[in-house]
Image (tube, rainbow, N blue to C red):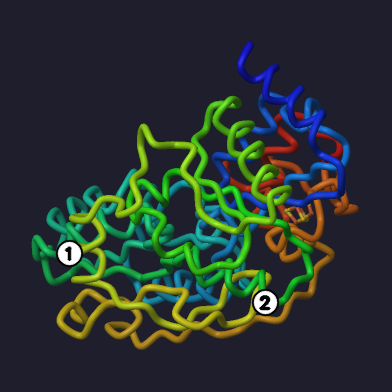
Amino acid sequence: MALGKEISEKLREIVDRDLTFMHICGTHEAAISRTGLRSVLPSRLKIVMGPGCPVCITPQGEIDAALDLVKKGCIVATYGDLLRVPGTRGSLESSGGDVRVVQGVHKAVEIARSTKKEVAFISVGFETTAPTVAATLLTHPPENFSILSCHRLVPPAMKWLLEQGEARLHGFLLPGHVCTVVGYQDYEHFPVPQVVAGFEPEDILLGLLMLVEQVLNGEAKVENAYPRAVTREGNIKARRLMYEVFTPVDAEWRGFPVIPESGLGLRPEFEEYDAQKKFDLTFRHVEKHSACICDKVLRGIAEPTDCRLFGKACTPRTPIGPCMVSHEGACKIWHMYRVKQG
Ligand code: SF4
């Protein structure tokens, strides 16, 4: 950690103004919270969380659509993290239906091959998971298999955040996992400093140092502090697979309005696997009626500890919002590592 110490000392030496950078990755938040990294940063340098947890940003209307699939008698296959996320009529866990936790889409296809019943996979995730789902659909799974596509693309949400300006951001720490797949060329048009960072504390500190240096030099470009895993172009094959099967569609994010072209829908050639079409489901907008402030946490304008329910009514055992359910959710991470304040 000698390198980390050196970087944090350098940061303390050069940060001469209030700076706020956002990361968009639950794994970054876990690394920052687990290592207490915020405590070694200069007080004027703030890292806020963005919409980096795919389960957390899935809006209630999509959870309700998953519950509709249960009601229609489907076997619903899903990641464990999604099981307890509340929709308006409870969660998949409390639905009483045949809901099975799987580790990935291939396991859901295996279930479909073993039964005559309809099997629907709730397909959440960013650019990291969409290529795997695409590759699976290209193998032509059985006709009793479909997916509810809840995928999201990161850059359109960043564009929205910058246009709104409510989080007063000076730059972004870009998600290393997502950039491994899609590279970072799609980020180059944003007029703010951005650095792709890995997940060791030194990676994150280096990313922050590079961001601060860009601000101090009056620059706004994309730099790569994670070259051992990320290239500008990313994984070209994975990207091609993703767009062979999916196409960008307008999508609502929890805490955000509908963001143009921020979701992934199935192309017409794959609509036989589209659970939304197959079962005539619509994603309805649901107004928020609880004291949960996940919406603000996901937009980087509140911290988990700002929520009056944090650690009281809302705990990992009794989660009220998705940020306390998912292992990539900021509230669960802060609760787990007993973070008191960012
Ligand atoms: S602590 Fe619970 S209720 Fe509060 S914002 Fe987080 S998930 Fe929502």
Which numbered disc covers residue 137?
1
SS for dot 2: helix
Q: Around disc 2, counting alpha carbons within 10 Å, would you say few (fewer than 14), some (14 to 19), or many (20 or more)?
A: few
**Furthest residue toward front:** 217
- Residue name at image x 77 percent, y 63 percent: 167
- Residue name at image x 55 percent, y 85 percent: 284
SS for dot 1: helix
Q: Identify residue type, mark 2.
A: Glu
- Residue name at image x 72 percent, y 65 percent: 295
Disc 1, ligand 1: is the CB inside 8 Å?
no
Q: Around disc 1, counting alpha carbons within 10 Å, would you say few (fewer than 14), some (14 to 19), or many (20 or more)?
A: many
Label 2 sits on residue: 163
Residue 182 drawn at (x, y percent): 34, 56
Looking at the image, residue 177 lies above or below residue 143 = above
- Residue name at image x 62 percent, y 49 percent: 23
Residue 1 drawn at (x, y percent): 62, 13
Looking at the image, residue 282 lies above or below residue 136 = below
> Hey, which quadrant is residue 203 in on the image?
top right
With 17 as the anchor, is 251 left or right in this view? left
Q: Identify residue type, mark 1.
A: Leu
